[in-house]
Amino acid sequence: MTDTYFGEAVADPYRWLEDYQAPEAKSWVAAQDAWTRKQLAALPAREHYVKRLAELEAIPAEIGRGLGLHRARTDARRRDVST
């Protein structure tokens, strides 16, 4: 797919991925996920970093907003740090 911006043709070879429910997009995402997991699994210190990130994410973050503080996340899965 090609769009034209200010008279310039700009190709968008990944536009088809916008329909993330399409079988082709799902297949592409699954293949990318498998490739990425294989690469990450091969990292020598991966387990150390996975464990450390989990520890850090479990710490309640306090972020200053004006003169006060508020909790930025309530659990390790939700990270709402919008200001």
Image (cartoon, grey):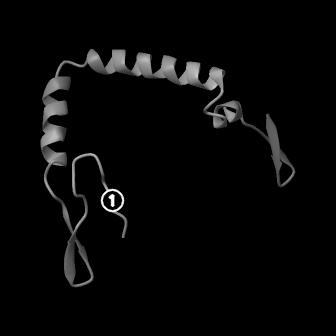
Q: Compare residues 33 and 6 and report the one nearer the observer.
A: 33
List x then y, in percent, for residue 12: 72, 36
Find residue 45 and report its image quarter: top left
List x then y, in percent, for residue 1: 79, 34
Q: Residue at x 35, y 20 (%)?
A: 37
Q: Residue at x 18, y 40 (%)?
A: 53
Q: Residue at x 19, y 75 (%)?
A: 69
Secondary structure found at label 1:
loop
Q: Compare residues 40 and 7 and report the one nearer the observer.
A: 40
Q: Residue at x 40, y 21 (%)?
A: 36
Residue topped by disc 1: 80
List x then y, in percent, for residue 24: 65, 21
Q: Is residue 66 above or below residue 53?
A: below
In the image, farthest residue toward the right:
7
Q: Is residue 19 left or right of residue 81?
A: right
Q: Label 1 is placed on what type of residue?
A: Asp
- Crowd band around label 1 with a 10 angstrom C-alpha radius: few (<14), some (14–19), many (20+): few
Q: Is residue 40 left or right of residue 3?
A: left
Q: Is residue 71 above or below residue 39?
A: below
Q: Is residue 44 above or below residue 50?
A: above
List x then y, in percent, for residue 28: 57, 21
Q: Is residue 25 left or right of residue 82?
A: right
